[in-house]
Amino acid sequence: MASLCLNSLPLSPSSHPRKLNESSVSCSSSLLLDNNNNHSTAGSLKPIVVSGNPPTFVSAPGRRIIAVGDLHGDLHQARSALEMAGVLSSDGQDLWTGEETVLIQLGDILDRGEDEIAILSLLRSLEKQAKAKGGAVFQVNGNHETMNVEGDFRYVESGGFDECNDFLEYINDSGDDWEETFTGWVDVSERWKEERKMSASYWGPWNLVKRQKGVIARSVLFRPSGPLACELARHAVVLKVNDWVFCHGGLLPHHVAYGIERMNKEVSEWMRGVGKDDNTLNIPFIATRGYDSVVWNRLYSRDAPDFVDYQAKQACSILEETLQAVGAKAMVVGHTPQTIGVNCKYNCSIWRIDVGMSSGVLNSRPEVLEIIDDKARVIKSKRDRGSELQAAAYT
């Protein structure tokens, strides 16, 4: 198992050629030591240590942890949630203000909105800034990330296809530094979007052509080995930070038995196109396909009227078995919008944090989960930041 100190060893960016209309895109997955870019923690806390590639096990002693649920292409709501959590500046400069905080976003950044790539760009920028302050930013892939890598664009908004068109043009006209180019997209995307809307009258008679261009652009960006598929490949489907486990849908005992680091590696390799040929795609079924896969599972998030008592007890028993197997005290999931807001169940051993904040879902008020010293609370807004929907202390 690979291990590294996050505050000393930066994750290496994927390497991409300047022009992306070539036959292939090279993606690097290795974690490299950069002796010229060491960072000490800002305070007296021990360094963050990450194991696995993609990151799977994280030791973050004494850190404040913030978990943010599904964002679905809504940059405005994403910024509101991050500002409310105290990790993003409110001056429009997109600066990291979380110091040594660990931020975890639980997937489903893609689909249902028109600023998907801009959100990915923002989080990548914050990741770099946080590392310099002794903090960290992690992302967990959700079902909409895996769907797009599979070429399933059913939930893509027209603005999402437009953003792909713009982004492909942007990176083809940029230099060879992928990381600088990618993190810069959030700064220019809104200007490009405004310019595109101003020229909408020109495209009026050619909407079909424009849509076809958008589908092609998205396919180039998200296909296995594509530049954005390689970005997603940097992220896990299951992440354990201290005594908490984070995933999009829900972890089950057979996932743990299969091996969470193994699943993360297989999903990453699939997204990077490792070992693929023209006829086959080795899609990691246990993590990305089926109702009980890691990114699709809703067992812990259902509260349907027909979910009778014995089924609830069975779900609780499965959750307990899973947590014991993975060595965690609690699990945090997204995926299923909670109309009552962030909440916990089964003695607060499961936290459900997808509140449907995107305008493409419920357009609800952003909420995030804060964990300090194994005590969890919900942050709803700046003015009632001290209020708690539910607090749970674990020993």
Image: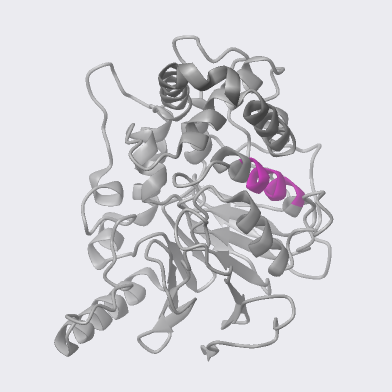
Q: Position of residue 209 (x, y in %)?
A: 43, 16
Q: Nearer the viewer, residue 174 or 325?
A: 174
Tell me if residue 56 comes above or below residue 235 in the rendering: below
Q: Residue at x 39, y 89 (%)?
A: 347
Q: Which residues are magenta?
A: 121-129
Tell me if residue 288 comes above or below residue 349 in the rendering: above
Answer yes or no: is residue 265 visible.
Answer: no
Q: Which secondary structure class fits the magenta region best?
A: helix
Q: Position of residue 207 (x, y in %)?
A: 45, 22
Q: Residue at x 44, y 10 (%)?
A: 23
Residue 117 is covered by the magenta coloring: no
Residue 122 is covered by the magenta coloring: yes
Asked whether, in this view, residue 61 is left or right of residue 355, the answer is: right
Q: Residue at x 36, y 55 (%)?
A: 260
Q: Nearer the viewer, residue 249 or 321?
A: 249
Q: Position of residue 216 (x, y in %)?
A: 42, 20
Q: Quadrant of residue 146?
A: top left
Q: Position of residue 103 (x, y in %)?
A: 63, 61
